[in-house]
Image: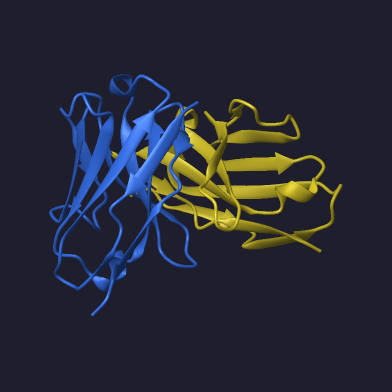
Chain colours: A yellow, B blue
């Protein structure tokens, strides 16, 4: 099973600041199968990024994804109040999907 | 509009069984893979199972293989999760989600709560 490790566990930032979230895989991941999700308290997850860098339908362009191999990044250029949430990376490989443990982006 | 609605969650004793349902609308159900994903209280997301378009191929997480069975009825646009030999650690919110390999999980239900406790 491919393990995804996200860092940091918690990111404390102010609205308007830039957020950089990391996702590291235990072995190389096909970038086509790397996605990012946002989850707010009491809500289902929402797809943000697929294929490592392609924004899903309706996702604002302040969200961007990058990376390849074992290292992937989600960047939020200017945090809006509605962006404070938990973010998960996800991959498909070895006939299974796995999620990272999540990064919480909280208001400083 | 794409809509997924789960049902069937309940309180069940360890060793018991439960069947979850997920009713889909707003898209051509038969053309999509479907998944179940769970989230234990205060914890992260865990993928549980996937079924392909025509019930030819089902895959499972190691933690549920042999106990859970995913199935679908394309005529009813519904996906199911039969859960047997339930354990306390199966307690979670169970989400159904639509998703392919390179498209992420682009639609999710609101979740149904399963509690396994004596």
Choose between A77 and A8: the one closer to the eye: A77
Up-down relation of residue A50 to residue B113 (above or below): above
Up-down relation of residue B33 to residue B67 (above or below): above
Q: Is residue A67 visible?
A: yes
- Quarter of the view holding residue A62: top right
Where residue B89 sits in the image (x, y, percent)? 30, 69
Left or right of A99 on screen, residue A71? right
Choose between B99 and A75: the one closer to the eye: B99
Q: How many marks?
A: 0
Choose between B11 and A30: the one closer to the eye: B11
Q: Is residue A94 visible?
A: no
Left or right of A94 on screen, residue A105? right
> Residue sitting at 27 percent across and 34 percent down?
B78
- Quarter of the view holding residue B75: top left
Where residue A22 sits in the image (x, y, percent)? 62, 49
> Residue sitting at 71 percent across and 41 percent down?
A75
Q: The C terminus of chain B lies in which quarter of the figure?
A: bottom left
Left or right of A49 on screen, residue B49? left
Where residue A104 sits in the image (x, y, percent)? 64, 59
């Amino acid at each position: 099973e491919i393990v995804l490790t996200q860092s940091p566990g918690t990111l404390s930032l102010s609205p308007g600041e830039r957020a950089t979230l990391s996702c590291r895989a235990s072995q190389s991941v096909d970038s086509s199968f790397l996605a990012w999700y946002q989850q707010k308290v009491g809500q289902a997850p929402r797809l943000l990024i697929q294929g490592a860098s392609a924004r899903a339908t309706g996702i604002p362009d302040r969200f961007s994804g990058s990376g390849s191999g074992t290292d992937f990044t989600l960047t939020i250029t200017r945090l809006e109040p509605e962006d404070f949430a938990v973010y998960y990376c996800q991959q498909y490989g070895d006939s299974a999907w796995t999620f990272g443990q999540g990064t919480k982006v909280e208001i400083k | 509009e794409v809509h997924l609605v789960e049902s069937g969650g309940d309180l069940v004793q360890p060793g018991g069984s439960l069947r979850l349902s997920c009713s889909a609308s707003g898209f051509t159900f038969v053309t999509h893979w479907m998944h179940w994903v769970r989230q234990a209280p205060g914890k992260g997301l865990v993928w549980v199972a996937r079924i392909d378009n025509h019930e030819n191929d089902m895959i499972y997480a190691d933690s549920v293989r042999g106990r859970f069975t995913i199935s679908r009825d394309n005529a009813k646009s519904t996906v199911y999760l039969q859960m047997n030999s339930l354990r306390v650690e199966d307690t979670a919110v169970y989400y159904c989600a639509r998703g392919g390999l390179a498209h992420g999980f682009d639609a999710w239900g609101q979740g149904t709560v399963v509690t396994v406790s004596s």
